[in-house]
């Protein structure tokens, strides 16, 4: 074997070793990214739950027995302050759900979002608010079309009527 052949063999062997090390580093990096992704998903879930609990606590603290009685009658039976409380509660939950959908929470499982929208819109006042908001929107909501379709389906299921189309 000549010197040139030995040099080519050593170079080929070194290239193989470097390639193996790079592949191993990529495997380690993928595992690290998977762990980071799981941590981010857990953090997002915890934050969403925390925000929902805070919003529900705020609603409970700002509700009166009179307001709770008027929920199933609708917005037209409420004072301006009561309407503002319903608007804040409903819009807050909807913004959280839209953000969760946008970030891919629960792998965008439609059943998760249907259930949560149903919980938010479980009274006439919230249904009135979402209908009014949709009818009077001055800009796009930023919601994904699939999320919007889920919202429309749940609204129709609960109210028995179609949700008015947005101007945008």
Image (cartoon, rainbow, N blue to C red):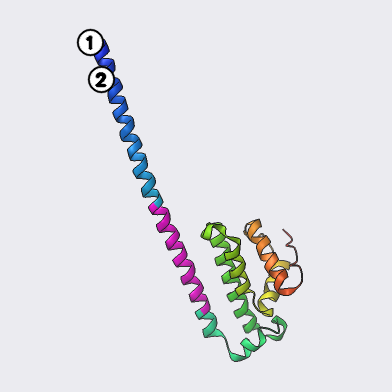
> Would you say residue 136 is visible in this rendering?
no
In the image, what residue occupies the spot 71% across and 70% down?
157
Q: Position of residue 131 (x, y in %)?
A: 71, 71
Tag 1, which secondary structure? helix
In which quadrant is the C terminus drawn? bottom right
12 is higher (above) or lower (below) than 94: above
Q: Position of residue 159 (x, y in %)?
A: 73, 74
Is residue 23 on the magenta stretch?
Answer: no
Tag 2, which secondary structure? helix
- Horizontal arrangement in the rendering, residue 86 relative to residue 54 (left or right): right
Q: Main secondary structure of the magenta part?
A: helix
Is residue 39 on the magenta stretch?
Answer: yes
Query: Which residue bears the numbered disc 2?
Result: 10
The part of the image, by quadrant, that contains residue 134 is bottom right
The part of the image, by quadrant, that contains residue 21 is top left
Q: Tag 2 or tag 1, which sits nearer the N-term?
A: 1
Q: On residue 121, which mark appears?
A: none
Q: Nearer the viewer, residue 82 or 138?
A: 82
Over which residues does the magenta segment extend?
Answer: 35-56
In the image, what residue occupies the spot 70% across and 65% down?
152
Q: On residue 3, which mark appears?
A: 1
165 is higher (above) or lower (below) than 11: below
The span from disc 1 to disc 2 (Cα, nearest Å) is 11 Å
């Amino acid at each position: 074997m000549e010197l040139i052949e030995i040099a080519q063999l050593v170079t080929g062997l070194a290239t193989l070793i470097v390639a193996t090390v790079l592949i191993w580093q990529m495997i380690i990096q993928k595992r690290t990214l998977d762990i980071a992704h799981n941590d981010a998903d857990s953090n997002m879930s915890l934050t969403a739950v925390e925000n929902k609990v805070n919003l529900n606590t705020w609603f409970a603290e700002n509700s009166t027995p009179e307001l709770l009685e008027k929920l199933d009658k609708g917005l037209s039976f409420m004072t301006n302050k009561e309407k503002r409380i319903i608007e804040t509660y409903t819009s807050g939950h909807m913004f959280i759900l839209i953000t969760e959908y946008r970030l891919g929470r629960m792998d965008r499982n439609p059943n998760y979002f249907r259930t949560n929208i149903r919980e938010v819109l479980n009274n006439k006042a919230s249904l009135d608010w979402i209908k009014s908001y949709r009818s009077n929107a001055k800009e796009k909501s930023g919601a994904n079309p699939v999320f919007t379709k889920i919202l429309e389906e749940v609204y129709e299921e609960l109210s028995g009527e179609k949700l008015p189309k947005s101007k945008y």
